[in-house]
Each structure stands twice: as C-alpha cells, then as structure tokens.
Image (cartoon, rainbow, N blue to C red):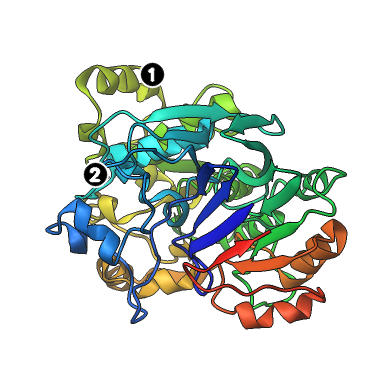
Amino acid sequence: MNLTIHRGTHEIGGSCVELESDGSRIVIDLGMPLVNSDGSRFNINDYADIPENELTNNILPDINGLYAFDKIIKPIDGLLISHPHADHYGFYNYVSQKVPVYIGEATNELIRITKLFGHQKHGLGKVVLDTHLFRKNKSFSCGCFTITPYIMDHSAFDSYAFLIESEGKKMIYSGDFRHHGRKKYALPRFINKETTGADALMLEGTMMGRDFGRLLTEDDITDRTVEMSKNCKGLTFMYFSSQNIDRLVSFYKAALSMKKVLVIDVYTAYILVKLKKFGKIPYPSKSYRNIRIFFGGRYLDKLPDKEKEQFMHDMGAFKISRDEIMDNPRNIMMIIRGSLLNSLKKFSYPEGSIFIYSMWEGYLKDKSMEKMMEFLNDNQIQRYILHTSGHATIDTLKYVVESIKPKALIPIHTFRPDQYNILGHHNIIRLEDGESLNI
C-alpha cells in the first residue's frame, strides 16, 4: 500500500491523502486550506478568475484522474469524505462525476445546505456527483480497498475515522476527533481488535504546540452559560456555528434549565429540521416548545419557491416577533450572526445585554467581524468568550497511540509534526506534502 499526503503534513486544514494498492487509487478528503502560505486566511473566491484547470498549479492537489477538467484514462476509484468541515471537503465540487464519492448521509446533507446558503463563486457543482452513502461500522469496498468508517466525537456533526485495508495491510486515518464532546463513547468503540496493531496511523495533531491541558466539556459550556445568563438584565446573544450541533445542544440545555426561550434564525432552523432524522436533537416543534424562530435576514430567499412555502407553513407556528423579544428580553437567549445585523439594529437594547462568542478566537480578526463589534460597542453589549476545541488534547492523542499501538505513526493536520515524539511512539514517520511512503 502506497501513501501520499498531498496536503496536511505541516498545516491544519486542506487535508488530502492518496492511497494506491494493487492498481487501485483512492483519495481521503479534499479540503480547502485554512490559511495561505503567508498566514492570511484562505478564500477560494480570490481565485474566481482563474480557470479551474489551472488551479492544480498552486491550489488544488495535483492528482490525476480526480477532477472534472482532467482528460483521464482511468479515474480515481473513490473519494472518501470524513466530515462536513470545509478544510476536509471544500474542493469536493471540482471532482469528476466519474469518481464515486463515499460520504456519510448527514455529511452529504450538511454540504448541500452549505452550498445552498453559501457565497462561493468557484466550483459550485455543475455536475451531479456519483455519491455513495456509507454507515458507521459498516465496511464497504472501493477498488481493492476495504474501508470501515467509525463515528468520532468532533465539533462537526457526522465525523468519521477510516480503517482502510488492502493486500494484508491496515492503515488508519483518524480524521478530526476529540474525547470531551457529546460523543465520548465513540473513541473507545473506535479502539478495537480490528484497529489495534494497524500498520500505520495517520493521526491529527491540531493541538500540538498549543495544548491547554483539560479542556471544557460541552456540559461545562452549558454550566458556564447559565452562570453568565441567569442574572443578565437584558438579552443573551450567542455567536457560534449553527452546524456545530454539540454547541447548539449546550446552549439549548442552558436555556431549558433557566426556563428561557432559545431564539434561532432561519438558517439554524433549516439545519435542525434537516438533521433531526439523524439523531435526537432539539428543533422547532411541539416537542421543544422553548425554541422559537426569528425571521430576520434573507435566508429564505435562497430556497426554491416550493420549499420556501413548505418551510413557512411548517415553521410559521414557531415564529417570534421583535416585539415579543423586547417585551421580556431577560427571558431570551438569541443566536446572532452578521446577516441579522440590519434587523437587529431596529431593536432597542436594555442595559445589561451580553454577547457570548463560542468559536475559535482567530475568527475575531476577520473583517467580517468588524460590523459585529461595532454593533456590540454601539449598544454597550458586554462580550464574553466561551469555547472549547473540536480537537483532541495531548493526553487523548497519547491514549489513542498507546491503545492502538500502530507500527508507524504519521503526523497530519498539524503545524507541529516535530512534537509528535511526546506521544511516546518508537516509529514516527514525518512526511512532506507530496512525499510517498510504502506501508
């Protein structure tokens, strides 16, 4: 089995791995980078004027047989997508429809939603891809490979690690994971007789060089939200990714414990309605009466007319007006995002309103946050940061390495591959992007 990490040996994000065995080739993840070579934030729209077939010169991993613009004789046997974060699937739409794409059902739905509401100008899926939906713990074949997906605890809903077998060899791709979220059960189930003793483990190391010891759990997030909000004299605003379902559940539980109303926007409501069939999650319904929807912004305009009409019919009963919010602001916990600012400027804010930021702090430096900060300052809304990582601590990484006992440990998804020695493994193989390794 031959392994090539096309991107990810010295950076977080943009993950892409190619495996070749007995004439078969598969690719694991096809992510957008998070940053450019100079450290600035990567934005695919900066390359909108470059023809797609020229992007392999510096943006897309140069993998023959993968893309729609390739003049190919034999396409890649399959593309595996580990989870619905753009740094793992973001170049998905450049893939040839001749290449089967293997993906979790909820991940496929979240990618569809992102495309529907997004603003990406490049690679928006001009063809219908050959999508194959896999299920956790259910092995499937792709070329000469046998692949088993394992559900993992991560800030992205529907995240997987892969056990990949061929020609008597076993390789594990960890994907992104943690052990302090709402799926803590996942990691012990991943470590089993099938994965133990694998020939190679490609292990994410996001926290290398910046580990903070014990991180907050999602229950900690709930408890601290209650502490911040219970005596709040005004509105409690929350800013986070609506696709981070674990975080939404944390805030929902906080609202429920204080008997407050959780006000969500249309985008969040749409996500919850579409994901409710994949697990027990709160969504606007008679079963979750403290969830209401504020119909601000222009998200509904993104929906086809019939779907928009159906959504309004189903969700209209859970609408909350500006007057209802302002009649009792102390009873409200409300999701806020940039697209709502024009609507929110029409509110009058009582003294004592608070804003809870619950994402990576690096995003605060984005230009998109400038108007949000101006809004908070203009209305004297106090800011708090309350977040926990979606990635494994050093102790968790040690636990995985000590439990699986791989013959070789390969750093990926990390800025600090040089620090993997702290995990105590005897055979750490540090690759460069594009370098191949025979397992």
Picture coordinates of residue 115, whole percent (x, y): 31, 40
Left-right relation of 196 to 202:
right
Q: Residue furthest left?
A: 49
**In this view of the protein, can residue 130 be seen by the observer?**
yes
**Which residue is under mark 1?**
314
Picture coordinates of residue 325, whole percent (x, y): 38, 44
329 and 148: which one is in front?
148
Question: In the rendering, which numbered label is found on residue 44?
Answer: none
Which residue is pictured at 21% across the width and 50% down the height?
A: 122
Left-right relation of 30 to 68:
right
Q: Earlier in the sequence, mark 2 or mark 1?
A: 2
**Which residue is under mark 2?**
69
252 and 19: which one is in front?
19
Number of callouts in the render?
A: 2
Picture coordinates of residue 81, whole percent (x, y): 51, 43
Q: Secondary structure at mark 2?
A: loop
Task: Assign the C terminus to one quadrant of the image.
Answer: bottom right
Q: Alpha-carbon distance for marks 2 and 1?
A: 41 Å
Left-right relation of 355 to 341:
right
Which residue is pictured at 56% across the width and 43% down the height?
A: 157
Give the amino acid type for the residue marked by disc 2 in the picture.
Phe
58 and 136: which one is in front?
58
The image quarter in which residue 422 lies: bottom right
Q: Check the image and report above or below for 244 versus 132.
A: below
Which residue is pictured at 79% across the width and 45% down the height?
A: 185
